[in-house]
Amino acid sequence: MTQPEFFGFRRVSATSVKVFPIEPRRSTLAPTTPPPVAVNAPASADDAAVEARCRRVADRMVAYLEAAHGWRTREEIGLDIGLTERECRIGRSHSGMRIIFGQHGFRATSQATLEEITTCADTLLSQSDELRKQAIQLRKAAHARIGG
């Protein structure tokens, strides 16, 4: 007797696992169209509140950086407008690319040079490449654990 399927794996014995493709289950019910789901929609009122707070932090940072006319470190931002280092990172990531980052800290994109913007974009691409490599390594490690 074989064990039930679990995410494409089936335990054959106490020490071996076989990998097989998951076949879609056929339903006898008439197909239905799922209701439309908004992309990146908050899952609950709490999520919406967190998202709104992140946007407010981003708006505060953008206004501050546009008035500051230059690069500002997290420490300077914290002293001037009371944000923690974590809130600075959150604000930048929720700014809709209105804030760039670099070795000197943060800067309003509207006041940055083309070279500064390009350098920030290159850094983001490099980070994403590195994260992709790490994800692939992690999947290989998981696959090795199951005996693949």
Image: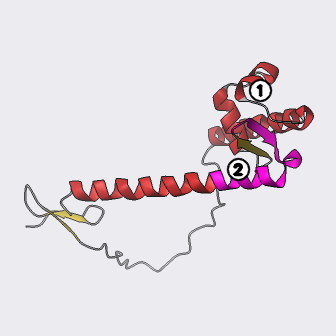
Q: Callout 1 environment at 10 Å: few (<14), some (14 to 19), or many (20+)?
A: many
**Image spot of residue 78 (x, y percent):** 74, 23
- Dividing the picture into quarters, in which one does residue 81 lie? top right
Residue 60 pos. (x, y %):
82, 33
* Amino acid type shown at disc 1: Ile
Residue 45 is situated, as x and y percent measured from the top left of the image, at 65, 41
Front residue of 109/13: it is 109
| Residue beneath the point at 80% across and 47% down | 98
Q: For label 2, count other residues whose C-alpha is less than 10 Å away and answer few (under 14), some (14-19) or many (20+).
A: some
Identified by mark 2, the residue type is Cys
43 sits left or right of 131 in the view: right
Question: Which residue is at the front of the view, 134 or 60?
Answer: 134
Q: Which mark is residue 40?
A: none
Q: In this figure, which residue is indicated by the disc labeled 1?
A: 77
Residue at horizontal 22 percent and vertical 54 percent from the top: 145
Q: Earlier in the sequence, mark 2 or mark 1?
A: 1
* Residue underneath mark 2: 120
Judged from the image, the secondary structure of the residue bearing numbered disc 1 is: helix
